[in-house]
Structure formats: C-alpha cells, structure tokens
Image (cartoon, coloured by chain):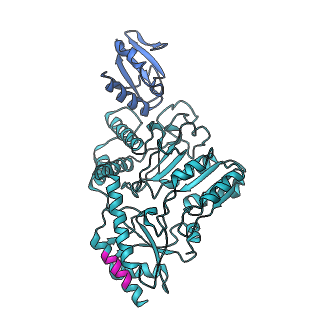
Chain colours: A blue, B cyan
Amino acid sequence: MKVICLFPSIHFVLKAEKALKARGLKPKLIPVPKEISSDCGMAIELAREDLPRVGDLPSELKPEAFYLRTPQGYQKLLDS
Amino acid sequence: MIYLDQAATSFPKPNEVVEAVARTLRNVPGSPGRSAHKGALEASRIVFEAREGIASFIGAGDSSRVIFTSGATEALNLVLQGFLREGDRVLATGMEHNAVARVLEALRRERNIEVVYLPCDEEGSLKLDECEKALRERPARLFCLNLVSNVTGTIQPLHEIVALRGETPLLVDAAQAAGHLPLDVSALPVEFLAFSGHKGLFGPPGVGVLYIREGFEKDLRPLKFGGTGSRSESLEQPEFLPDRFECGTPNLPGIAGLAAGIDFIQKIGLMRLHRHETALADIFLEKIRSHPRVKIYGPKDRVKATAIVSLNIEGLSPSEVARQLDEEFDIAVRPGLHCAPLAHQTIGSFPQGTVRFSFGYFNRLAEVEKAAEALLAIAERA
C-alpha cells in the first residue's frame, strides 16, 4: 500500500525527497492526484511501512497531509 | 579589448556558466514549480539545487530563505519598500548606491520616513563613533549597509557594525562583495543580505538574491504578487518561503548560470580569486600613483578595499579620460558618478565623478600593465 505526502510547494517536495533519500528510503515524485487536491504540483509517494521514518524529518519538512491510496480511492490519514 | 569594468558586470563569464545557461534553453522543456511533467520537474530541480548551493555558499542553513530576484536592486527594493512603514527612522551610510538611496528618497516623500546618512571619511570608511551615536540617539527601524563601495571598493567593517547595531535590523547591500569576500550569515548574523548574480558571482544579468533571516519575513510585504505554482486555489499570496516573495515564471537560465558561477568560484577558491584581483589592483596602483597629475581615491591601506580603483587626471574630465582609453587604447572603464552620487560627495569627487578601473579574475597582468601605461600617457599630455 502506498502513502502520498503533500507539501506546501515544490521546494519542500524536493527538500524532503533529498532528506528521505539520505535516510535510505525510496521516495517517488508524482503529480498531486486530482482527487486529493486541486493544486497542480508534485507530491511524494512512499511505501506505507516507511511512513514512521517521515516522522524523523525536521519540522519544516513535515508533510502537510498524508493520504493512503486504497482500491476505493484516497483516504486521508490523521498523522504519520 | 582590455575589459576593466568588472564592477559593472564580470566579463568574460566562465564556460561553465555559458553552458549551464545554454543547457536550460536547449534541453529543459518546462517551467520550475509549474506542472508535474519530467521537463518541469527537471527545471524545478535546477532551481532547487541552485537555492541549496547559494544557501550553503552564504552559510544560510535553510535554503527556503534564499529568494531569487531580478538583481540586487530588486532585492534591496523588496526590503526597503516592504519593511519600512510610515514615519520610520532609517540609518544608511554615506556610500550608498542609488539602488538604496533613491528608494529611501521615494519613501521619504511617500511615507515620511526619516533617513540619516551616517558620515564616512574621505576614503569611504564609516565613522564608527558617529554610527554609535546615531544608533543611541533614537531607535531605528533599519540599518542599510553598503558593504563594498562600487566607487572606491571600500570595505566596511561588518564585524564591528554587527556588534554595534544591537537590535537594529541590518540590510547589507553586498552587490560588490559577493564573489569577492566571504559572506557567512551563520557567523555574522544579518537580517537581510542582497546581492546580484552577474557581478562577482559570474552569472548572467537578470538574477540576484535576497537572504532573509528567520522571523523577518513576517514584517515584510511582498514587492510582487502573482502565480507561484503553489496554493493555486487561494487568491492570497502564500505565507511560506520562498513562494511568498517569488512569483511569475522564474529566470531559469539566469538561476542555472548563477549556480554554475558559484560552483566555478568554489572550484577556484574565493581567497585565490580575491588575491588575484587585488594583486592586479595593487600593481596598477603602484605604477600610476606617483604621477603628479593622477589623483587616487579610496583606502590607502588596500587591505580595506576590493579590486576597484577610482581616480582622476588633473585637467581632464572623467568621461574624456574614458573616451581616450576606449578610442585610442581599446580599454573599457567606467567614468562619472557610478549611480552613487552620495559616495562621490563623501570622497570629494562630486559632481564630476571619477574614472573607475575594476579588475577581475580573468584579467591578466599584461592587461593591467598596458592600462597603467595608457593612463600615464594620457596624464602626461593633459
């Protein structure tokens, strides 16, 4: 199962991508799914089991929101 | 041509810069931060890496505090127009460039701000006792510091000023300092640092930087409002950096070129580059200083200056000297007031100005020798 992490802007997406890679994770950049947000930017997709590691990121790189991709659609997670 | 107008814009640009600019124009199909296709993502990565590189170059831990502007002038305008309110008191040096002085003059008329120009000696160095007095007299909203004069190359004592200013926020105009002197906002905390990309940093024109210290973005009104590629559903400009102060399509070729220029400097080494430039200025000065008709301005102790030399030949206007250098000797310099009438008033060369020779990393010793000979020949027949 995949989790989608949303950030305020591309700057934070790329900064978080760098930080997650440095932690040995494999973040994937994807366009923000239109079901989640009308924003035209990018988001980070991670394996669900990697989610706790996102909690290690410095506060300014914490995602604004997390969504779980399920067969029924996207489901907002309350916290990482 | 012998190009000794490096303080206006550095020339030539390193091949790496030319290649970086060309690469964006040839191979990067997209606009940074807009849409999510591969080309746009690559453009976004170029801007992101440039921002990270600049943050590390100036010791700013958080790269979102590095704002790209069209140049030092826009960066300075953003702070002055965005930070100063009705009736504020502002301190500035007697060496300011019009990129600061004209904005302050406009705000004096429009927002009734009080502008205090702190006196400098005839070499252009700030009189620290007068500075201290003005700081004690009444709190100021902002202190504008021209770190290196574009007229004389005079370097202001930033360490002392950072210590003296106490709580007063400091705006440093580093247009003539970046790429010549180390700038480290982690060691020397300043609130705002503005510089251009096309001078000492070897980038193309049309790109500059404003660094904003944490917390000082809150009182800063954006100079421009518009599309950022983020929070597009909202009609409010985003609060977060860098988007709050950057809108419209970014200057991708300029930003890529600036990043390549900084990489070039780091490859050469800033100190090596600085030593080369200042050695050229010293050799030039050594050859011309004893001529009775040549008057030299700026610090006598050249440790206090970058590779900028301002002078006059008795009996000739600066523009006449520059014309002869250009037409007869194919040497490019800049005469006149250099957009800095206050600095010329301070050093005693107003209103005629001076002839400015500015040296750079790509200038060679033979060029400097030819320039000195040409100047002496012009002085001899004056």
- The residue at 46%/13% (across/down) is A77
The majority secondary structure of the magenta stretch comes to helix
Note whether residue B304 is visible.
yes
Residue B365: % across, % down: 28, 70
Looking at the rendered image, the quarter that the N terminus of chain B falls into is bottom left
Up-down: is B122 above or below B217?
below
> Which one is nearer the viewer's eye here, B219 or B300?
B300
Question: Does B132 sit left or right of B207 as displayed?
Answer: right
Task: Report how many numbered discs are placed on residues in the image.
Answer: 0
Residue A70's image quarter? top left
Find out whether residue B371 is within the magenta segment: yes
> Which one is nearer the viewer's eye here, A47 or B261?
B261
Find out whether residue A15 is within the magenta segment: no
Q: Which residues are magenta?
A: B369-376
Residue B47: % across, % down: 38, 41
Residue B376's image quarter? bottom left
Question: Does B268 sit left or right of A14 as displayed?
Answer: left
Residue B266: % across, % down: 32, 49
